[in-house]
Amino acid sequence: MINGVNAMRTIITQCLNNASPARATLSPAPAGRSGSLSAGQRLMISIEYRFYHCVADDSYWTDAAFDNGFWQRYLSAFSHIGIIARASCIEAPEPGWKRVDSERVHFHALPFYLGPLGFLRRFFSLTRTLDRLCTDQAAWIIRAPSILGILLYRRLEQRGIPFHLEVVGDPADAFAAHVIDHPLRRFFRWFFTRELRRQCAAARGVAYVTRTRLQQRYPCAPEAFSAAYSSIELPQAQVVNTLPPPRAGRELRLLFIGSLAQRYKGLHVLLEALRRCREQGWHFSLDVLGDGRFRPELVQQAEALGLEAQVHFHGMVAARAGVIGYLDRADLFVLPSLTEGLPRVVIEAMARGIPCVATRVGGIPELLAEEDMVPPNDAAALAGRIMALAQCPDLRTRQARRNLVTVQDYLDSVLARRRTGFYQRIATGSGIPQAG
């Protein structure tokens, strides 16, 4: 087993370190609908996300995040953008899926893969595709951390093409021992942390989703420009003006929203916490919004704990109005994540005047007060905080008021200025600070 792990680690390292771009085969990326574009007009952006390619009409779709509406923010500074990401082929999109591409938003599909072994199998076709896409006739943003971003930034750097980063997570947290159980975990944690530091040091400009935390761990170069903004879309109309009166009693309604594709959102910890609450006489109900491959396992856990009557799995709720409906019916929002960047769902819950309990990870300390957070993977502490808020309506009201003040910094009107300022500096090439 150890020899197998060491071999895999060696193969991955050698593939990435020796993946020098083949300059002889370099050609500019296809211009597509937009024709020949200058760097100030065209943006290429890579993202570690799984999209879907409908072969019948050559369209691209998402089953959750990053639909066409998300990419409009980049068009404030660029005439066209090209998305570089994985896409698996489908015959037709499922009901509720959303279109990604459009006349000004193009998609450059990479060979699809899943997991480290899938990445290795597709490695050479991935590198060939990236070689074809790399061009100095566009501005570049890499959303990091990302294995694709590592391959891409090395190609851009070796060609002398400036690139920029949007840092949306922390690999040191994502590969922590309490988050994943994988034989290569320690190697992945060391490797991705090292690579993100290198990327930040080499980028012309870096935007972070946190105000200070990621900046401290992954500083940009002294001559680079930087910004801090979340990816959330929060219009003023989504923020409540008055708080609903807090409910009393021992049967409050809790809400969890998050992907069930991985275990890092910590729903398994919340289920154990609910068992502990029930032993103390608190019979909370829990609505779970989200789906993924771990849903059957989590349903089984809820049944094994005797919580099947209390926990309700609703799957993916795509419509924004539907999500807001669940938020407005909730007495308490809980996000027991094992790792996070800056969770948008917590900000959305805060905007509806809901008290929140979350773990002390990622950028969450920038959102919640110390007493509203618990250590990750600690069901006892989580249960204790939930019960403390449940038995004190005034405490929930005070936290909700504090939340409404905090979310003012995350309104569209505030974040749009920061994002647009960052994108415009990229588009105009004004990344180097002027003297004076």
Image (cartoon, rainbow, N blue to C red):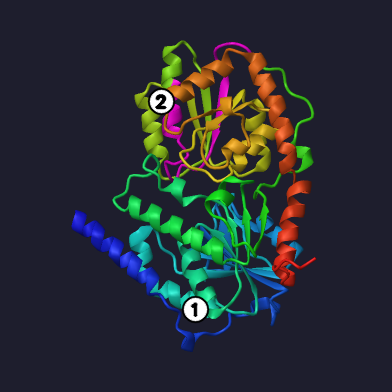
Identity of the residue drawn at 45% across and 34% down: 376
Mark 2 surroundings within 10 Å by alpha-carbon count, few (fewer than 14), some (14 through 19), many (20 or more): many
Question: Would residue 255 be seen by someone viewing this image from the given angle?
Answer: yes
What segment carries the magenta color? 248-274
Residue at 55 percent of width and 52 percent of height:
63
Q: Position of residue 240 (x, y in %)?
A: 76, 31
The image position of residue 405, as x and y in percent, is: 74, 32
Residue 308's x, y, as percent? 43, 24
Q: Is residue 146 visible?
A: no
Q: Quadrant of the C terminus?
A: bottom right
Q: CA distance from mark 1 to mark 2?
A: 48 Å
- Residue at 70% across / 28% down in the picture? 402
- In the rendered structure, the answer to whether residue 16 lies left or right of residue 220 reads left
- The structure residue drawn at horizontal position 55% and vertical position 61%, both measured from the top left corner, is 200
Tag 2 or tag 1, which sits nearer the N-term? Answer: 1
Residue 378's place in the image compared with 258, above or below, is above
- Residue 287: image quadrant is top right
Q: Where does residue 68 sit, x and y in percent of width and height?
A: 66, 58
- Residue located beneath label 1 in the image: 131
- Kind of residue sitting beneath label 2: Glu
Question: Considering only vertical position in the picture, is 308 above or below 208?
Answer: above
Looking at the image, residue 329 sits to the left or right of residue 310; the answer is right
Within 10 angstroms of label 1, few (less than 14), some, or many (20 or more) residues?
many
The residue beneath circle 2 is 272
- SS of the residue under disc 2: helix
